[in-house]
Image: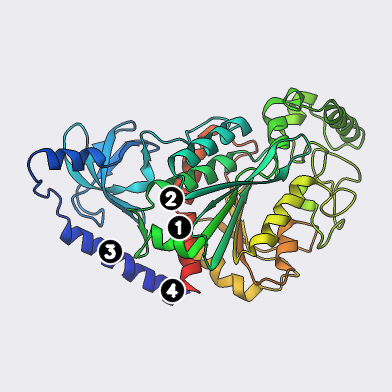
Amino acid sequence: MKSVRYGMRLAVLFWVLFFGVCMPLRAEEPAGEEASSEESALPVCRVRFSGQGLYVYADPLLSGVPIAVLPDGARVQVTLGPVDTLAGIRVCDTGAEGYVDARYLKRADAIVEDYDIYTYEEMVEDIRQLQARYPELLRVDTAGASADGRDLYVLTMGGKNATQHILVHAGIHAREYTNPLLVMEQLEQCLEYYESGSFHGTNYRDLFSNTAVHIIPMVNPDGIALSQFGESALRSPELVEMVRICYVYDVLAGRTDKPYEVYLTRWKANARGVDLNKNFPFGFGIGTSAVQPSYAGYGGLLPFSEPEAASLGAVTLQYQPTIVISYHSMGEVAYWDTSESRYRELNRGFSSYMLSMVPYRRMGGGGASGSYLDWLYSGETPVRSVTFETGNAACPLPAGQYPRIWLHHGSVLQAAAWYACAGL
């Protein structure tokens, strides 16, 4: 991987120097209505997550003395890129121009907002608006319904004839509901800069023409609703009764000593008390911590007994992805391997590449226990995969964890697509 990283650095340096030379800090602007029209077409972004302020540099290498410091909420126009994580900007109030870290910019009219709690209903509305804004770039499908009747969405960005497929999923465990917000924002960022962005010397359009990205943003919408709002979020009286039975079992089995309302916030399973990440065939039933429906740890009666796990499995089989990104929480660690994996060596390089950008601790894998990763690594399609455990606090993650998560993961989709295109 040293040669890969060296090549990437050379590519980035080339693009930075190219844009730094060809696009001077204060280019002379054409006069009249043509210039005004061009300026008004530039996207307007606001600064966020910068803490003490976002430094603006004259040097595209972001070195030297800053020429300005922008507070959160300041508005800028993006004049260049993003090129990897670099953006050329013009400050709306002063007209000053320079370069900044693009991860601290968010489009002023962004659809996916910074929610304290990102709900299924907000996600559905965001999907509707994204599809309306980017009808040629985003395809929206459903792959079945949850136990409580919520649609299970699959969002696809990329060429219809793409030769490579990437699958990204989040929210398989209910209390880990920060990650659906993350993957929705990752998607919107790529759609926003589809024409102007580039990564490691390849523009986004080429990246995603050759590589289709399929995102399941919320694998377990019922469980997430239950963790967020309690039993009143469930539509089915039968499922409410099942949740209550789970609580009685978990109390009697010594699996919880929490009050019912607190117990529900810690829920991991779907609305039928099945841990979806133990409902897959390979290693099914091994090492489960619960012998009947529970808030966590029960694998179900049979593999794929749960509609949500069956949906994720069906999408995986449909697209045969060669790269899979799984989002979980917590610990700021990354899992890349299992004891029985057929693709350990293939995945070693990919996980090293991803962890060169996401500064998480590498973790190995134990024996099979019916997880999605166990099933994935036992299949016939060679696959590279990494499971990111976001956040460094107990789940559900506090809203204050999100800025750090975003800064770590804002370029994950672009990086995975580049790796797929590079054929490494």
* Distance (Cα) linking label 3 and label 4: 17 Å
Please name whichever residue, 65 or 91, is drawn nearer the observer in this view of the structure: 91
* Distance (Cα) linking label 2 and label 1: 8 Å
Label at residue 4: 4
Q: Position of residue 187 (x, y in %)?
A: 49, 47
Mark 3 or mark 4, which has the lower sequence index?
A: 4
In the rendered image, which residue does mark 2 sit on? 190
**In the image, what residue occupies the spot 80% across and 25% down?**
260
User: Label 1's element?
Assistant: helix
Q: Does the residue at mark 2 contact the one at mark 1 (Cβ under 8 Å)?
A: yes
* Distance (Cα) linking label 3 and label 2: 19 Å
The amino acid on which the numbered mark 3 sits, given as a three-letter code, is: Trp
Mark 1 or mark 3, which has the lower sequence index?
A: 3
**In the image, what residue occupies the spot 16% across and 60% down?**
22
Q: Given this view, does label 4 or label 2 mark the residue nearer the observer? A: 2
Q: Residues within 10 Å of mark 2 (few under 14, many from 20)?
A: many
Q: Does the residue at mark 1 contact the one at mark 4 (Cβ under 8 Å)?
A: no
Q: Position of residue 334 (x, y in %)?
A: 60, 57
* Distance (Cα) linking label 1 and label 3: 16 Å
Q: Does the residue at mark 3 contact the one at mark 2 (Cβ under 8 Å)?
A: no
Q: Residues within 10 Å of mark 4 (few under 14, many from 20)?
A: few
User: Label 4's element?
Assistant: helix
Q: Given this view, does label 3 or label 4 mark the residue nearer the observer? A: 3
In the rendered image, which residue does mark 1 sit on? 414
Please name whichever residue, 106 or 314, is drawn nearer the observer in this view of the structure: 314
* Placement of 306 over or under 9, stated as above or below: above
Please name whichever residue, 266 or 22, is drawn nearer the observer in this view of the structure: 22
Q: Position of residue 383 (x, y in %)?
A: 63, 68
In the rendered image, which residue does mark 3 sit on? 15
